[in-house]
Amino acid sequence: AKQDGRNTYRFFTAEMQAESDRTLLLENALRRALERDQLTLHYQPQICMSSGRVIGAEALLRWWHPDLGCVSPAEFIPVAEASGLILQIGEWVMRTACRQLKAWMLDGIGGMGEITMAVNLSSVQFRHADLPALVSRILEESQLAPALLELELTEGVAMNDPHGAIAVMNDLHDRGIRMSIDDFGTGYSSLSYLKKFRVYKLKIDQQFVRDLSDDPEDRAIVSAIISMAKSLGLQTIAEGVESQGQLDFLREQGCNEVQGYFFAKPMPAEGFSRFVLERDEP
Ligand code: C2E
Ligand code: CA
Ligand code: CA
Ligand code: CA
């Protein structure tokens, strides 16, 4: 038994070592990728439930490394956060996404100012004192109205320091920038803070959407989130919509917007504009 125990222990540390090697490898590779401009953004359409039109894009980071291949943001974002690189990456994401939206507008994609750009924000960025000024600066640079940018925050950003979070949200709000709560329903702070946070939209997490067609509990949760949002005057968007059945339920409940593979996967900018043009054809 003792031997077993030691083997288990050894195995565990070996695994931990491998993990920290990978983290270090990713961190260095990520730093180089940033310098060499090897990060890209894909854009996933957000669809208005009532008109069926594309009314938004969510910018999602993509990283293709010559040796490592495609590394998922779910893996490299935490590395970027731990190393502080996320500040530079996040600024690059925001600037690139804003420029892209402006370029689409100038091309007449989706009309003038009918498409908003949603950008994911790490809690590290959110806690950085410079954030509201940085966002304003980027909007000015790209000559975009602030209401065209939507910052997606998770409930977690407010957890450590709710007072600080409220101050930052007020500042962003006063600058005309909209905020939505991403992965809504998966954190714990949601209900008590919703009132105090200057939030514009709730993004219902895909874990509740996945089994919507046959799980009565998920149906109850989604329906409760939507009706609560309505009574608080908040917009709702459901993510991870993959089927007609899910869409039908969300429509019945009065969800405002939908996003998911049922409509389109995240795609490069050219793919996105082609999608909008094809979809908007009469
Ligand atoms: P998220 O913000 O919750 O993004 C939704 C994720 O679900 C994306 O994964 C998207 O590709 C995927 N998705 C969209 N529709 C469907 C669907 O119908 N079915 C399924 N199964 N999945 C769908 P992705 O692109 O791998 O991103 C993972 C996470 O990485 C994001 O989750 C976000 O938290 C983070 N992330 C991505 N880009 C950025 C960024 O620029 N900054 C920050 N801070 N985080 C980012
Ligand atoms: Ca998101
Ligand atoms: Ca999400
Ligand atoms: Ca997420």
Image (cartoon, rainbow, N blue to C red):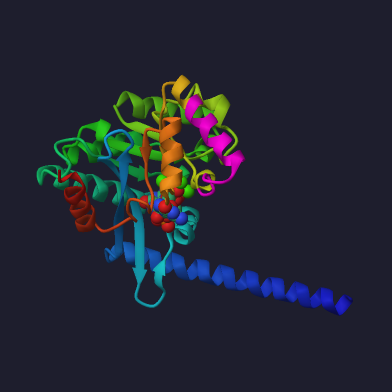
Q: Quadrant of the N terminus?
A: bottom right
The spot of residue 245 in percent (x, y) is 45, 45
Say which of 252 and 7 sits in front. 252
Dividing the picture into quadrants, the one containing residue 274 is bottom left
Q: Quadrant of the C terminus?
A: top left
User: Is 213 in the magenta?
Assistant: yes
The residue that appears at 21% across and 36% down in the rendered structure is 114
Residue 212 visible: yes
Is residue 146 positioned above or below 100 on the image?
above
The residue that appears at 26% across and 31% down in the rendered structure is 147
User: Is 231 in the magenta?
Assistant: no
The spot of residue 35 in percent (x, y) is 29, 63
The spot of residue 275 in percent (x, y) is 22, 52
Residue bounds of the magenta highlight:
210-227
Is residue 213 positioned above or below 144 on the image?
below
Total count of labels: 0
57 relative position to 248: left or right? left
Say which of 112 and 199 sits in front. 112
47 relative position to 210: left or right? left
The spot of residue 131 in percent (x, y) is 36, 38
Dividing the picture into quadrants, the one containing residue 134 is top left
Say which of 68 and 222 sits in front. 222
Q: Main secondary structure of the magenta part?
A: helix
102 relative position to 30: left or right? left
- Residue lying at the far left of the rendered structure: 107
The residue that appears at 31% across and 33% down in the rendered structure is 50
Residue 128 visible: no
